[in-house]
Amino acid sequence: MSSTQRPAHMRPGPQGLYDPRFEHDACGLGFVAHIKGHKSHRILEQAIQVLKNLDHRGACGCEVNTGDGAGVLIQMPHAFNEEVCRKARIPLPAAGEYGSGIIFLPRNPTVRRLIEQKFEQVVQSEGQHVLGWRTVPTVNGMLGETARSCEPFMRQVFIRRDPSITDELAFERKLYVIRKRAYNEIRTSTMAGAEYWYVVSLSCRTLVYKGMLLTTQLDQYFTDLHNPAVETALALVHSRFSTNTFRAGTAPTPAATSPTTARSTPCAATPTGCTPARRASSRRPLARTSRTSGRSSTRTAATRACSTTRSSCSTSRGARCPTP
């Protein structure tokens, strides 16, 4: 396989001044949520605006239209899934009775189908049932040559929960086992196209869209994100800034589980911008709170969500930040 055809996640070994051991990121993160848990498409729109405001925390190569990566995590959009599954003639059960996720696959249809069948075998061996597959619509006209050369084929899979699993958390753990088993039995195998295999997320609670994209390209690339039926009460966005690394479509990784302990007000990510009146040195160390306890208060999460827009704000210079 030539270097132009090699998937971006297949990095070279140590050579010259490069050593994969030194790879690390300096990414940008943003989080938007409705404080009362009300789902709407507006939350997703605000999160995408936050992502665009994080452009300074994302990187691009010599091609200005090839980014290091961007992605968004949302709650499982059941109304949207019902709509697309009806068109694809996939029998979809009630919310919480199925899991779903987007998977990167090779573009060759014959090779892709063999890998899909292998994954279905893994799912069946774990006592679950694959309801069907859906091709995720994408628009790649804005991508650079490097991004297009390793662009995977994206499919969304739907997995029905076995009646013997009555607990949602138990089903979530089962989906985790399926994802890990599939990695070991497909990605590390000698199957043709196995190097393209990557499960973006697999959950009954959340769904992740991501790729080797600039922050401004995410909603252009995934047309699903413009559908009003895609509603969520929270959204986590990620803009990758690779440092001493090779870009990869698998690298922008919003957490695969919903951060239910952190909340913020919806207005915190409104694209009007704000400039803090206090000096940066007087702020509380937000990152330390999340590292030590894994939880943050409503006030802390709201401040974090708002702070993602400040550095690119130019509309309210000198104004006090409205976030409490």
Image (spheres, rainbow, N blue to C red):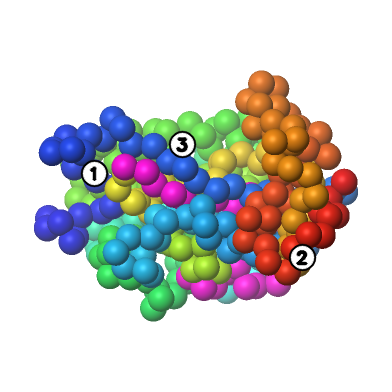
Q: State how many labels appear.
A: 3
Residue type at the position of mark 2 = Ser
Q: Which residue is mark 3?
A: 178
Mark 3 vs mark 2: in front: 2
Distance Cα–Cα, label 1 vs label 2: 43 Å
x and y, in percent, of residue 288 in the image: 66, 26
Which is nearer the eye, 235 or 124? Answer: 235
Residue depicted at 18% across the width and 38% down the height = 17
Q: Is residue 167 left or right of residue 118?
A: right
Q: Is residue 311 left or right of residue 182?
A: right
Q: Which residue is mark 1?
A: 11
Q: Which residue is mark 2?
A: 316
Residue depicted at 32% across the width and 60% down the height = 61
In magenta segment, residue 238: yes
Which is nearer the eye, 78 or 142? Answer: 142
x and y, in percent, of residue 41 in the image: 73, 66
| Helix, strand or loop under label 1 | loop
**Residue extent of the magenta highlight:** 220-244
Quarter holding residue 18? top left
Q: Pick whichever of labels 1 and 2 is earlier in the sequence.
A: 1
x and y, in percent, of residue 159 in the image: 54, 48
Residue depicted at 70% across the width and 36% down the height = 281
Residue depicted at 42% across the width and 56% down the height = 59
| Helix, strand or loop under label 3 | helix
Q: Is residue 276 left or right of residue 202?
A: right
Q: Is residue 24 above or below residue 239?
A: above
x and y, in percent, of residue 113 in the image: 31, 58
Q: Pick whichever of labels 3 and 2 is earlier in the sequence.
A: 3
